[in-house]
Image: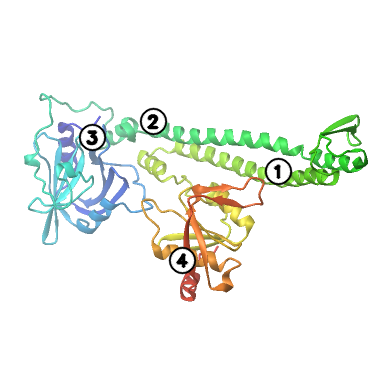
Amino acid sequence: MSLNWPEINLILSELELPGCQIQKAVQSAYDVIGLKVHGRGRTRQLLVCLSPGACRFHETFRPFPKTGKPLRFAEFLNSRIVNGWITEAEQLGDNRVIRLLVRQGSRQYRLYLRLWSNAANFIVTDEDGAILDAMRRLPKRGETTGGRYRPGDTPPQPGPPREYALRDLPGEKSFNEKIDDWYAEHGGALSLDKLREQARRNFEGSMGRLAASLEKLKVREAEFINADRLREYGDIILANAGSIKAGDQWFEGDNFYGGGTIRIRLDPEKSPAAQAETYYGQYRKAKTGLAGIREDIDAGEQELVRLEKNLAALLEETNPLVLQKLLRTGVPKSGGTGGAAAKKRPGLSFSRNGWLIIVGRDAAENDELLRRHVKGNDLWLHARDFPGSYVFIKQRPGKTVPLDILLDAGNLAIFYSKGRNNGEGDLFYTPAKYLRRARNGPKGLVLPTQEKNLHIKVEEKRLRELENCRIEK
């Protein structure tokens, strides 16, 4: 339930904002802003929330979470109104629109907080009503930079007039304190109950899928554990090579390993020696696969423990703003990243203009990067005609890889390949989601699809610049 107009008036009267200075704006989510203000001998944190069903403006007494990545509207506020003085704070009639007048030097800004559940917004204009920016840019309403906003032109919300009363909240605290406590428990999508439910839903889904994958891996592990019988088949065939005739499809004889009689399928087109080598080859692949599967099981079990710990930490969080931020950013409460990200990344890493480029130097590093450090939309590059490194460009949300970064990665792909002495070469690249592991192939071998071609001439200057961008581990 959002604030009603009598509650807004009471909150404003308790805050006594005229004469206060705005010191900082912090945005913990796309619909939540914190304004740090100082006045009357103390510093306070004002919360502006535009979440449907929980639109509100009041003082919050819970620590406001720091943001890892600055969000647009908070950056705008910090560039315009920080250190400005609030000269007026009032609700315009009973329409749940708050206007704050802020004087910053010789300039005056108008901050409008429209606390309507289905059309909430935080709009900043100049003295003439020209919109400088809005927390929610709504082109259909004209609420974008360069538009005009006059709250007097906004019609009242539809429906018959309703009488509203102050909520009867228990306790002897100020109304700001009581409303802050109430929303922490009942604030719709921003209440602790809802956020904890979301945390459980997010984590339990991931844990369920991970547990199912572990079960499948353990089934394959059990199959591979019996790989010794393949080697035994080869030994038995060689020991009985003289009794196997051309064209035989089965061998039946003594099992000198387990005792009794054994029946082994044969390829009628192969000699006994070739048939034995086939079983030996299957044995070697099974033993190699067993080691990889056990690595995957170990990593999966560690990831499951990490998810369980992170879920427990989230459920213990008592500040809904912090919990909302943790769910949005995916950063555990401890501040670590855990799981695969916490595990040391193999290979070489380069940071260039905000882009991360990773180079796997051998088959083992290539395989480890593919398994645990690369996602589907990360770009994969590899020299076309020579064995060499896998190079990955990590995706950035909403960004297309610039040509300059593609050339950086291409130079690294040629340089860390057997064709480096040629000074140039062809390579192909495609998103990692279009890579398919080669069945029964060596570790790290993949077959690309939807790949594109690029011819690279190695640039010594570019490589020197990249060396300066290398991330030391």
Give how far apart the Cα atoms at labels 4 and 1 are: 37 Å
Q: Can you identify the residue that label 4 sits on?
A: 408
Identified at 53% across, 67% down, the residue is 425
The amino acid sitting under disc 2 is Asp
Image coordinates for residue 408, horizontal then vertical, percent: 46, 66
Sequence-earlier tag: 3 or 4: 3
Q: Secondary structure at mark 3?
A: helix
Label 4 Cα crowd, 10 Å radius (few <14 / some 14-19 / many 20+): many
Q: Can you identify the residue that label 2 sits on?
A: 193
Q: What is the quadrant of the N terminus in the image?
A: top left
Image coordinates for residue 163, horizontal then vertical, percent: 13, 24
Q: Can you identify the residue that label 1 sits on?
A: 290
Q: What is the quadrant of the C terminus in the image?
A: bottom right
Q: Can you identify the residue that label 3 sits on?
A: 175
Classify 261 as above or below 470: above
Of residue 25 and residue 295, the one placed in the foreground of this image is 295
